[in-house]
Image (spheres, helix red, strand yellow):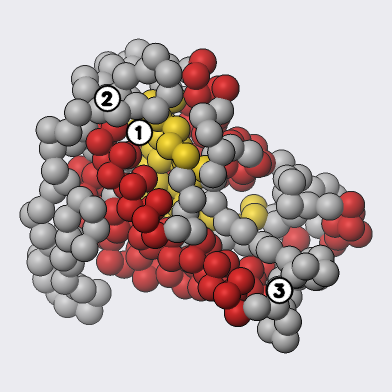
């Protein structure tokens, strides 16, 4: 059972039944008092309207302290969305400065208790209101003590479990935990996969690559099931992106990128935003390559 109650769905993939038939009417518990983490900020008791009179939308972004996650958070902020973020790190300075950055909750998504706490606190910040986007960005690609990436023949199997806990099961747990709020907002989930989940990559370990392949498959399954809640589920598969995970050795891959450069976190963030926006209202079950064409080879 999730902290905000069970969500019971009937699989209608192969039935010609009414849309939404069998969906639980259970909603997230309302009436919680907001508990914003950022100093001097309040949660969304009465969402402020945008300039065009529409209510501001809200997105949750995981792994938001750096790289693609941070660029994604900033991309949504620039477009007037309220954001709730989490990472292992404490409150970023940007969170303290921007009134739309509603909450940053320090969370270890590889830990089940920490995930459960994040779901409770984030739903409290929503205060019974809708959620319009969930970006499952947090991930890991660990190495052995000898700086080798985890392959099929090396590394402690516990390390493999750690990779799958963060890269696969955390997105599943969060998607379940926020399903009710996403249903209220007719929202969208975006899972961040990887080019390494589709082909052998010279610098990505087997544990990481296989976990991302599993996340791609789970995205398709989720898209079918969450459609009964009017929630879309898609993925973005980045290629070589200039983040802390990329070292000098990646330069040799540029000749195999048709656009002849590495991507930026902003390139990925803009695609994630599109998949959460109204411009993609009829897009679900799709994985978008953000690789500069690298996946063509």
Asked if residue 279 lies left or right of residue 29, the reply is right
Identified at 43% across, 69% down, the residue is 218
Residues marked 2 and 1 touching at CB (< 8 Å): yes
Q: Is residue 255 visible?
A: no
Asked if residue 46 lies left or right of residue 293, the reply is left
Asked if residue 130 lies left or right of residue 289, the reply is left
Classify 10 Å Cα crowding around label 1: few (below 14), some (14-19), many (20 and above).
Answer: many
Foreground pick, 145 / 190: 145
Q: Secondary structure at mark 1?
A: strand
Q: Secondary structure at mark 2?
A: loop
Q: Position of residue 84 (x, y in %)?
A: 41, 34
Snapshot quadrant of residue 44: top left
Q: Nearer the viewer, mark 3 or mark 1?
A: 3
Q: Secondary structure at mark 3?
A: loop
Classify 10 Å Cα crowding around label 3: few (below 14), some (14-19), many (20 and above).
Answer: many
Q: Is residue 177 above or below residue 22?
A: above
Q: Is residue 249 visible?
A: yes
Q: Position of residue 102 (x, y in %)?
A: 38, 26
Q: Which residue is mark 3?
A: 150
In this figure, what is the number of numbered marks? 3
Q: Which residue is mark 1?
A: 58
Q: Which residue is mark 2?
A: 44
Identified at 20% across, 51% down, the residue is 4
């Amino acid at each position: 059972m999730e902290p905000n109650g069970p969500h019971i769905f009937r699989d209608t993939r192969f039935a010609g039944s009414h849309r939404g038939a069998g969906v639980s009417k259970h909603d997230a518990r309302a009436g919680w008092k907001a508990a914003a983490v950022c100093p001097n900020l309040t949660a969304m008791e009465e969402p402020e309207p945008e300039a065009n009179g529409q209510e501001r939308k809200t997105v949750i972004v995981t792994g938001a302290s750096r790289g693609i996650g941070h660029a994604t958070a900033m991309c949504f902020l620039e477009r007037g969305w309220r954001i709730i973020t989490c990472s292992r790190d404490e409150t970023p300075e940007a969170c303290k400065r921007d009134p739309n950055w509603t909450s940053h909750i320090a969370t270890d998504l590889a830990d089940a208790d920490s995930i459960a706490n994040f779901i409770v606190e984030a739903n409290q910040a929503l205060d019974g209101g809708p959620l319009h986007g969930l970006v499952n960005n947090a991930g890991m690609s660990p190495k052995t003590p000898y700086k080798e990436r985890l392959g099929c023949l090396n590394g402690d199997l516990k390390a493999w479990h750690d990779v799958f806990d963060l890269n696969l099961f955390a997105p599943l747990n969060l998607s379940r935990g926020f399903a009710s709020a996403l249903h209220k907002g007719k929202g969208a989930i975006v899972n961040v996969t990887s080019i390494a989940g589709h082909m052998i990559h010279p610098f990505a370990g087997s544990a990481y690559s296989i976990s991302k392949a599993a996340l791609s498959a789970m995205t398709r399954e989720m898209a079918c099931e969450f459609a009964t809640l009017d929630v879309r589920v898609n993925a973005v598969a980045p290629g070589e992106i200039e983040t802390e995970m990329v070292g000098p050795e990646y330069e040799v891959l540029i000749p195999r990128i048709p656009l002849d450069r590495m991507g930026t976190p902003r390139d990925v963030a803009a695609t994630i935003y599109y998949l959460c926006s109204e411009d993609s209202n009829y897009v679900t079950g799709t994985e978008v390559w953000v690789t500069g064409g690298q996946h063509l080879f």
